[in-house]
Image: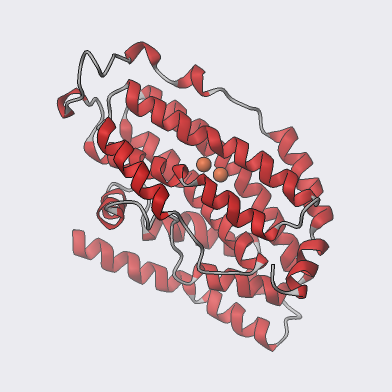
Amino acid sequence: MAFQEDLELLELVEPTVERLITEHRERRKHWYFHDLVPWERGESFKDKPWEESQATINERARTALVLNLLTEDNLPYYHVTLEKYMPEGSIWREWNGLWTAEEGQHAIAIRSYLLTSRNCDPVELEDDRMATMQTGWEPKWSKPAELFAYTTAQELATRVSHRNAGKITEDEDAFELMRNIAADENHHFVFYRGVMTEMMRVKPTAALEGLWNVLDNFDMPGVGIPGFLRRSIEVARAGVYNMRIHHDNVVQPLLNYWSIGDMTGLDKKGQELQDKIMALPAQLIRKAERFEARFA
Ligand SMILES: [Fe+2]
Ligand SMILES: [Fe+2]
């Protein structure tokens, strides 16, 4: 936490954070992953080693679930990122504890599903987890407004990606599990969007700067995952997550929600950021079209 103005911004939004935590606790009902994992399908890997022919869901769905799982596995790094910004003894720490505990169930649940249903190579998955977690993850940005712009967009993107991954499995158990996880991501998204909304109100230029820095070249936090590029192209082609979905379900809805284009009373820097952010959707569509043309 380097700058006084960053601390001030965090302090200014603390009352809102307190309200958002209360609302989150009221809204989210805890679910138990043991209820959703199809244990009855499980068999010993000692007696019956894994072979690809045992998989029951299509290859693209398996790739999507593994990619989403490895992203969830990196939770310790996301926790540390949040902790860096949250002054000790503040209400922020309560949120980070709660959020981390809820997120922790996601990797446990997806891994349990994949192993009991034999829809992944258990050795490869474990090797990939080891590699992913040793690489870790570090954000490119360093300001609170960037952190909350990122977590807002990222939770929404993850909600969409988990939901779509569950859909393409065509497997009732996987669908139900991913639906529950996606519901959690939605609760987290609502929290982070609420923080960002308050930042837009109290320090609009700083908030717009954070939003611009994050949305211009937005990265999913999976770059340290082995074969990330190949895997992300596969999930993009499968319609789990791609540039068009990013535009339609993440960027455009966020710009609409905050009415970025209609914000008034901004200083000169704020107005410049507003223009740059409003030009993003058209750029994303052009990228989406190029991707689609390449793989048509
Ligand atoms: Fe998650
Ligand atoms: Fe989440």
| In this view, 9 is above or below 174 | below
* Residue 53: image location, x then y, percent: 15, 25
Display coloring: secondary structure
- Where residue 222 sits, quadrant-wise, is bottom left
238 with respect to 198 (left or right): left
Q: Can you say which quadrant of the picture contains the N terminus?
A: bottom right
| In this view, 119 is above or below 70 | above
Judging depth in this view, the residue of 281 and 178 nearest the camera is 178
Q: Residue at x 35, y 71 (%)?
A: 286
* Residue 77: image location, x then y, percent: 52, 51
* Residue 52: image location, x then y, percent: 17, 29
| In this view, 210 is above or below 20 | below
* Residue 216: image location, x then y, percent: 48, 72
Q: Residue at x 38, y 51 (%)?
A: 241
Res. 61 visible in picture: no
63 with respect to 97 (left or right): left
Judging depth in this view, the residue of 194 and 103 nearest the camera is 103
Res. 35 visible in picture: yes
Residue lying at the far bottom of the rendered structure: 268
